[in-house]
């Protein structure tokens, strides 16, 4: 008859280091995609954060891979910048092109902040674009 196995001789469970490394790699990739989104929007961390209702420190932590973005942040990011959340989190899907409404929202924001001369220039460009598309 076989003797019972001595459980103390079994090897220990694999260390959690590979899981931690994979998670850190994932967070860094998400951070890089978030940073590319911010850079394409032409905003610094503070202004980007302000548009999303969070702090510049939080944006920095996510971009550096120290934090994972939460659900509320992801919804704000999608609503404000039309970011494909699946792409941001996985990198597997193509980034979706921005909706037309996003461009209009940005144009209106630029117009509101512009000087009188800037407003005239924005209107001239808008009229030109409309005349070409019609």
Image (tube, grey):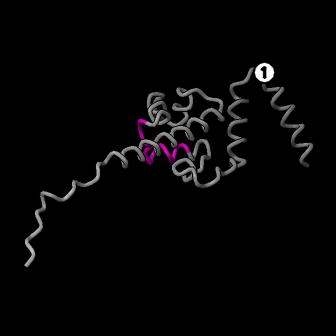
Q: Is residue 31 above or below residue 83?
A: above
Q: Residue at x 7, y 72 (%)?
A: 3
Q: Is residue 127 a member of the stretch shown in magenta?
A: no
Give the secondary structure at mark 1. helix
Q: Between residue 37 and residue 14, name the one nearer to us.
A: 14
Q: Residue at x 57, y 50 (%)?
A: 91
Q: Residue at x 92, y 44 (%)?
A: 132
Q: Is residue 113 above or below residue 99?
A: above
Answer with left or right where residue 129 lies relative to residue 77: right
Q: Between residue 93 and residue 112, name the one nearer to us.
A: 93
How far across and down, in percent of the image, does residue 89 sit?
Answer: 51, 49
Magenta part of the protein: which range?
66-77
How far across and down, in percent of the image, does residue 19 sit?
Answer: 37, 49
Residue denoted by label 1? 116
- Identify the residue at the far front of this view: 1
Q: Residue at x 51, y 43 (%)?
A: 30
Q: Is residue 70 a member of the stretch shown in magenta?
A: yes
Number of marks present in the image shown: 1
Answer with left or right where residue 29 lies relative to residue 68: right
How far across and down, in percent of the image, does residue 72 sit?
Answer: 45, 46
Q: Residues within 10 Å of mark 1 (few under 14, many from 20)?
A: few
- Identify the residue at the far bottom of this view: 1
How far across and down, in percent of the image, does residue 130 sit?
Answer: 87, 43
Answer with left or right where residue 51 lies relative to residue 97: left
Q: Between residue 95 and residue 100, name the one nearer to us.
A: 95
The quadrant of the image that shows the N terminus is bottom left
């Amino acid at each position: 008859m076989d003797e019972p196995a001595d459980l103390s001789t079994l090897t220990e469970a694999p260390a959690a280091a590979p899981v931690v490394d994979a998670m850190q790699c994932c967070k860094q990739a998400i951070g890089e995609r978030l940073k590319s989104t911010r850079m394409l929007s032409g905003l610094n961390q503070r202004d980007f954060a302000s548009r999303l209702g969070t702090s510049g420190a939080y944006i920095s932590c996510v971009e550096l891979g120290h934090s994972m973005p939460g659900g509320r942040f992801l919804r704000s990011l999608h609503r404000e910048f039309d970011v494909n959340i699946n792409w941001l989190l996985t990198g597997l899907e193509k980034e979706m092109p921005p909706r037309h409404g996003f461009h209009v929202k940005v144009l209106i924001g630029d117009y509101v902040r512009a000087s009188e001369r800037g407003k005239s220039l924005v209107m001239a460009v808008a009229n030109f674009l409309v005349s070409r598309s019609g």
